């Protein structure tokens, strides 16, 4: 049922997608994309994304098992179809993608990016692409049912992986437009998160020039604290993937390179908090924009320190092993531990109490710490303790 209702119509779009979508009898294609887009609707709410993508991933794994020897052909057609729909639904220039699609009319949907069918195709395409890449990354495990790796599948389908970078750029442009409604911006953010997660899987296959440019853009987004919190983890994961891609070409060590930019970002977080505290001491009040900035900084600190973490690391690896002894193709920086400065830890601790150590605007009472800031500070401190046993012992006492 899953295959007939969703997979078969999508696979059919691997060839001549534009013509099939613009002629009669196209309803089965749009129904498939609408169903997939509903799985991504939950991405806009905390805690729901993993269940939606996870369910789709499980269904694809069973599909691979049932396909048997035809699994490689199925994977190839799925990737080609999703690639073409991704380009169509974002109106990406055919020449910009550096790949000759079967139909040159890729700008057909440029007029209205949020028309019902176009939006459903865009959302659904990135939803299934995330689930598909998750399956292929885990293809070495027997339970996935796939007998082809992600790298093999991408090469077999002959898709140009630069399209993920072009897509992310287009999603960002749309999301930053003042003409886009809040509801559509939320949908774009969820799709951007799917796109970043896909990049974290296939970043090693993106052309070097595109990987360097996108990596620089993502780094700037993190430095400016312009990203909403739900995009920060996937952005950091994408940066790790691009770092590995660049290091594979340059011969540099991926752990050393990640360690360097993580420390640079942590220094940026420290300076940003120091600057904000100086401003607070002058004005004595915390505005809504301050809360948003602080929660982003705190969340960024926590996520940066979690790079390299593995839930199995403490139980499966001897403590004497270095990070380089723990890395795998799937986890290129596993075992990496970056510890923030004592000053940054102290700044995080300042936001734990109900009040800040700075008098309020009336010069009588201490400035209240917003509850959301305190919550993020506690979560961030928990992540710091998870990576640093000595710090955890101090707080336990």
Image (tube, rainbow, N blue to C red):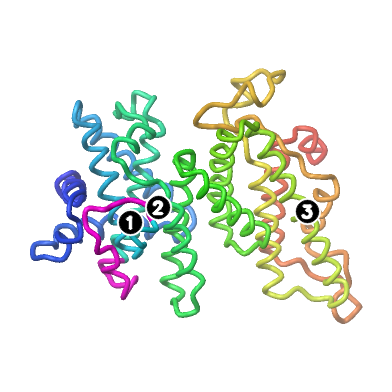
Say if 93 sits above or below 339 in the image: below
For label 1, the residue is 86
For label 2, the residue is 163
**What is the chief secondary structure element of the magenta stretch?**
loop
- Please indicate whether residue 248 sits to the left or right of residue 300 in the image: left
Q: Earlier in the sequence, mark 3 or mark 2?
A: 2
- Residue in the picture at 48% in, 38% down: 204
Q: Is residue 63 magenta?
A: no
User: Quadrant of the rendered structure where residue 179 is?
Assistant: bottom left
- Residue in the picture at 38% in, 55% down: 97
Is the C-beta separation of discs 3 and 2 under 8 Å? no
Label 2: state its secondary structure: helix
Which marked residue is nearer to the observer: mark 2 or mark 1?
2
Is the C-beta separation of discs 2 and 1 under 8 Å? yes
- Please indicate whether residue 241 sits to the left or right of residue 6 in the image: right
Query: x, y percentage for residue 31?
Result: 19, 59
User: Quadrant of the rendered structure where residue 351 is?
Assistant: bottom right
User: Which image quadrant: the N terminus?
Assistant: top left
Query: x, y percentage for residue 107?
Result: 29, 67
Task: Choose between 385 and 318: the one closer to the eye.
Answer: 318
Taking the view exactly as shown, the residue that stands out farthest to the right is 363
- Residue in the picture at 54% in, 32% down: 331
Badge 3 crowding class, 10 Å Cα cut-off, few under 14, some 14 to 19, many 20 or more, is many
Label 1: state its secondary structure: helix
Query: x, y percentage for residue 271?
Result: 80, 58
The residues bearing labels 2 and 1 have C-alpha atoms spaced at a distance of: 8 Å
Q: Is residue 116 magenta?
A: yes
For label 3, the residue is 348
Which marked residue is nearer to the observer: mark 3 or mark 2?
2
Q: Earlier in the sequence, mark 2 or mark 1?
A: 1
Over which residues does the magenta segment extend? 97-118
């Amino acid at each position: 049922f899953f295959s007939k209702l969703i997979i078969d119509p999508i696979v059919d779009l691997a060839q001549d997608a534009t013509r099939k979508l613009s002629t009669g009898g196209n309803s089965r294609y749009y129904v498939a994309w609408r169903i997939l887009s509903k799985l991504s609707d939950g991405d806009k709410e905390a805690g729901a994304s993993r269940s939606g993508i996870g369910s789709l991933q499980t269904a694809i794994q069973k599909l691979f098992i049932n396909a048997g020897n035809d699994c490689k052909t199925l994977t190839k057609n799925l990737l080609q179809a999703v690639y073409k729909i991704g380009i169509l639904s974002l109106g990406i220039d055919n020449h910009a993608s550096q790949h000759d699609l079967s139909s040159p009319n890729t700008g057909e949907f440029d007029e209205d990016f949020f028309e019902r069918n176009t939006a459903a195709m865009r959302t659904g395409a990135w939803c299934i692409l995330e689930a598909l890449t998750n399956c292929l990354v885990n293809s070495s495990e027997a339970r996935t049912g796939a007998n082809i790796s992600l790298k093999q599948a991408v090469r077999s389908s002959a898709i140009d992986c630069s399209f993920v970078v072009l897509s992310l750029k287009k999603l960002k442009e749309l999301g930053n437009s003042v003409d886009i409604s809040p509801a559509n911006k939320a949908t774009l953010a969820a799709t951007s998160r799917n796109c970043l997660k896909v990049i974290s899987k296939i970043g090693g296959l993106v052309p070097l020039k595109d990987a360097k440019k996108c990596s620089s853009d993502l780094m700037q987004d993190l430095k400016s604290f312009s990203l909403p919190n739900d995009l920060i983890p996937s952005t950091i994961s994408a940066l790790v993937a691009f770092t590995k891609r660049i290091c594979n070409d340059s011969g540099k060590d991926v752990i050393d390179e990640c360690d360097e930019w993580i420390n640079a970002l942590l220094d940026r977080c420290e300076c940003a908090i120091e600057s904000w505290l100086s401003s607070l001491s002058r004005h004595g009040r915390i505005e809504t924009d301050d809360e948003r900035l602080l929660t982003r900084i705190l969340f960024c600190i926590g996520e940066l320190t979690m790079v390299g973490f593995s839930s199995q690391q403490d139980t499966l690896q001897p403590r004497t092993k270095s990070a380089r002894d723990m890395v795998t193709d799937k986890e290129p920086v596993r075992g990496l531990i970056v510890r923030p400065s004592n000053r940054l830890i102290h700044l995080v601790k300042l936001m734990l109490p109900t009040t800040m150590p700075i008098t309020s605007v009336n010069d009588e009472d201490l400035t209240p710490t917003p509850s959301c800031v305190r919550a993020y500070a506690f979560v961030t401190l928990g992540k710091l303790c998870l990576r640093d046993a000595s710090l955890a012992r101090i707080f336990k006492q």
